[in-house]
Amino acid sequence: MSNLELVIFDCDGVLVDSEIIVNRVFAETLTEAGFAITYEEVTQKFVGLSYASCLEIIEQSNGRPVPAEWIEISKEREIAALKQELQATAGIVDVLKELTLPKCVASNSSPRHIELVLGLTGLLEHFNGKLYSCHHVDRPKPFPDVYLHAASQMGYVPESCVVIEDSVAGVKAGSAAGMRVLGYAPSDRHSSHHEALIAAGAKLVFDDMRQLLDLLKA
């Protein structure tokens, strides 16, 4: 890709396979609290959205607030499950070792979560503290704020950045920021997800992280 100077990675679902774990715990704990929802519904409705956005949707659709203690219980269970089960995305370790371009992370997750999951998978050292969260800006993805913030902090103009994203909200955010977006949709995701990423503005969609270095050179 010509004039490419900075690679911005989303975190969950791109660097680490955390979404399957987080979505499962989210569905289980919400259902236990009397807000019945399936894992499939969580995956369809909430992937790529910030935690605050998810809670807002749940409370609106149920017409009542989620109990404060649920948030604590859910987070504790999520962290325990991540510590037991979390893996880095297949192929990403080699990509990060070989990638010579500057890189950073821009995520809808909290700074604490980003550091936790990258720490658990041994990926934290590849980013030297260059981690940007929607908590640092006014609006989460699908707004472009966190991507524009990351580029600004790193010292690059949006046109010289490429975003690696796995969610529709994230692809929309990267596109709205004026950046090129590559969609990542592993082969176990439904083919409609591939199409949704393209429709949201991804330049192309790939299904194996090991392809990324060649795509960046193309």
Image: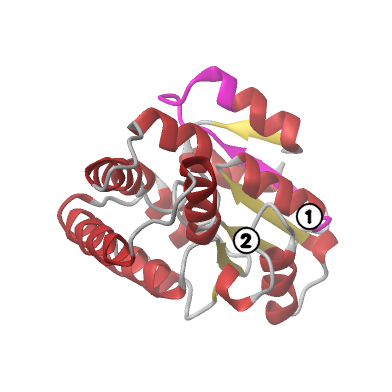
Res 146 quadrant in image? bottom right
Element at label 1: loop
**170 above or below 154?**
above
The three-letter code of the residue at mark 1 reads: Met
**Residue 133 visible in this rendered orientation of the protein:** no
Answer whether residue 173 is magenta in the image.
no
The three-letter code of the residue at mark 2 reads: Ile
Q: Is 7 on the left-hand or right-hand side of 172?
A: left
Residues 11 and 33: in front is: 33
At which x and y percent is residue 141? Answer: 65, 56
Res 168 quadrant in image? top right
- Residue at x 66% of width, y 33% of height: 197
Query: Are dots 2 and 1 in contact, CB under 8 Å?
Result: yes
Which mark is first along the chain, 1 or 2?
2
Residue 179: mark? 1
Q: Which residues are magenta?
A: 177-193
Q: Quadrant of the C terminus?
A: top right
**Count of all numbered marks drawn on residues in the image:** 2
Q: CA distance from mark 2 to mark 1?
A: 10 Å
